[in-house]
Image (cartoon, helix red, strand yellow):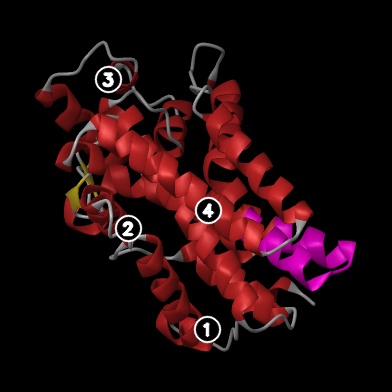
Amino acid sequence: MRTDALVDRRPGRSLPEILAQIRPGLEAVETLLSEAAHVPDLPMLASILASVLSGPAKRLRPALALLACEALGTNGAVPVTLATATEVLHSATLVHDDIVDSAASRRGKPAAHVAWSDKLAVLAGDYLFATAADLVARLERPRIVRQFADTIQRMARSEFVAPSFADGMRAARAQYLDKIGNKTASLVALACDAAAELAGAPDIQRDALHAFGWNVGLAFQVIDDILDVSGSSGDTGKPVGGDLRHGTLTLPVIIYLESGGERDGLVRRVVSGQASDDASMDEALRRLRASGAADAAHAWAAELAAQ
């Protein structure tokens, strides 16, 4: 199996057409997500879970899990359980991430900790982690349990990494790639890795699926970082420039600083927290948008996604 067997890649195929291959599976995932949010004896928890697990959402991870299972010939309820577990785990991390990042919104609506409280959001996130563990346990595959545990550890470790230009831009780029690899790519790769484990696929297929998922995950995060610079809140469901405001060094910023075109160090000061006023933020975003750094980052992501 080649990784391009995951989808029918005829020219002109749109994403909706590709996802149509697995529509019944995705609908079954939505059913399981609704069941996960059904906690009749705790209406407050049920409300938080329903808000977190309901759309709009890309469902990238469950889609890749279902596509990989289909490509490997694994059918029935098991792929749906795996796919749902990846989405529940992803949702749990988002709830906690929004607290860590003090994010006000998610997917166009107030983040859970804003709509309720930090305490309730933490507890809801914990509940979602436990729900993901329950779904994985249903698969009765110890190796997949270990894969999930390793991925959760990777995602947690990534929060202790803060890319910095203190050691030069080459080091900053390496730190950035390490961070987004553990934070984002690891979970996307997990969706493919676990599908390979379910199918009992040989090592060559496992390695190909892992590389595919890892590269897609890296590209996905880079595009998300680009949108934070050049997109709009309507596109992203969250305020533009959030990474800059929180001092998060992303690929568009790294590429911009690598170019050496900035003479007064404004963007560097904004990222380091030395200039946080609205005028400085707006000017930093304007410079980043005009520099072509976002286009260069997009080209890098497109190259990854094409592999």
- Callout in the foreground (3, 1): 1
Of marks 3 and 2, which one's residue comes earlier in the chain? Answer: 2
What distance separates the C-alpha of mark 3 from that of mark 4?
A: 38 Å
Secondary element at tag 1: helix
The residue identified by callout 1 is: 22
Is residue 21 shown left or right of residue 246? right
Residue at 24% from the left image edge and 43% from the top image edge: 112
Characterize the local packing of mark 3: few (<14), some (14-19) or many (20 or more) Cα atoms within 10 angstroms.
many
Helix, strand or loop status at disc 4: helix
Q: Which residue is painted at 58% across and 61% down in the image?
A: 305
Q: Name the residue under label 4.
A: 132
Name the amino acid type tagged 4: Ala
**Which comes before the other along the chain, label 4 or label 1?**
1
Q: What residue type is labelled 3?
A: Val
C-alpha separation, residue under disc 3 versus residue under disc 1: 44 Å
Q: Which of 184 and 164 is in front in this view?
A: 184
Q: Which amino acid does label 2 sit on?
A: Val
Q: Is residue 266 visible?
A: yes
What is the x, y in percent for residue 258? 48, 28
Q: Which mark is residue 39?
A: 2
Lateral position of residue 131 relative to residue 210, left or right: left
Whichever of labels 3 and 4 marks the residue nearer the N terminus, that label is 4
Residue 189 in the figure: left or right of residue 45: right
Residue at mark 3: 270
Query: Looking at this rendering, what residue extends furthest in the front direction?
Result: 41
Magenta span main SS: helix
